[in-house]
Image (cartoon, helix red, strand yellow):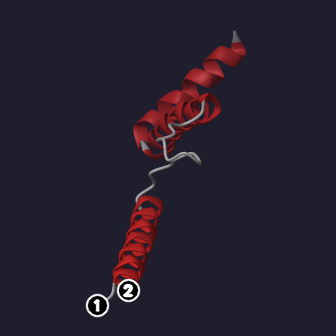
Amino acid sequence: MTFWTAIVIIVGMTIIGSVLRSRHNALNGYATDQQGNPVGPSPREREMAAELTELRERVKVLERIATDGNETVRLSAEIDRLRDE
């Protein structure tokens, strides 16, 4: 094996390793900038995630209200009572 063949093999292995690392990071959700530094979620993304969590909690409460038989009747009576006041 000549010197230049070894150089080509080393460069090829480096390229393949880089491609595999990039693929692995992309599949597992590791975001990086152009320099390879890890990038966290932006403030807007964090705000949206918090809002999504809040909305999911609200949906859980609404589902519980809608599916509880006795609670529905009690809630309906309470709403009617408040309307009459």
Where 60 sits versus 21, above or below? above
Closer to the camera in the image, 48 or 38: 38
Closer to the camera in the image, 21 or 75: 21
- Identify the residue at the far bottom of this view: 1
Q: Is residue 83 left or right of residue 47?
A: right
**Residue at point 54%, 37% (across, down):** 41
Query: In the rendered structure, which amino acid carries the disc numbered 1?
Result: Met
Quadrant for the C terminus in the image: top right
Q: Are marks 2 and 1 in contact (CB under 8 Å)?
A: yes
Where 3 sits versus 55, above or below? below
In percent of width and height, residue 34 lies at: 59, 48
Query: In the rendered structure, which amino acid carries the disc numbered 2?
Result: Thr
**Residue at point 53%, 31% (across, down):** 50
In percent of width and height, residue 19 lies at: 46, 70
Where 20 sits versus 49, above or below? below
The residue where tag 2 is placed is 5
**Residue at point 45%, 54% (across, down):** 29
Please tell me the numbered disc located at residue 1: 1
In percent of width and height, residue 28 lies at: 40, 59
- CA neighbours of label 2 inside 10 A, class few (<14), some (14 to 19), many (20+): few
In percent of width and height, residue 61 lies at: 47, 35
- CA neighbours of label 1 inside 10 A, class few (<14), some (14 to 19), many (20+): few
Tag 1 secondary structure: loop
Tag 2 secondary structure: helix
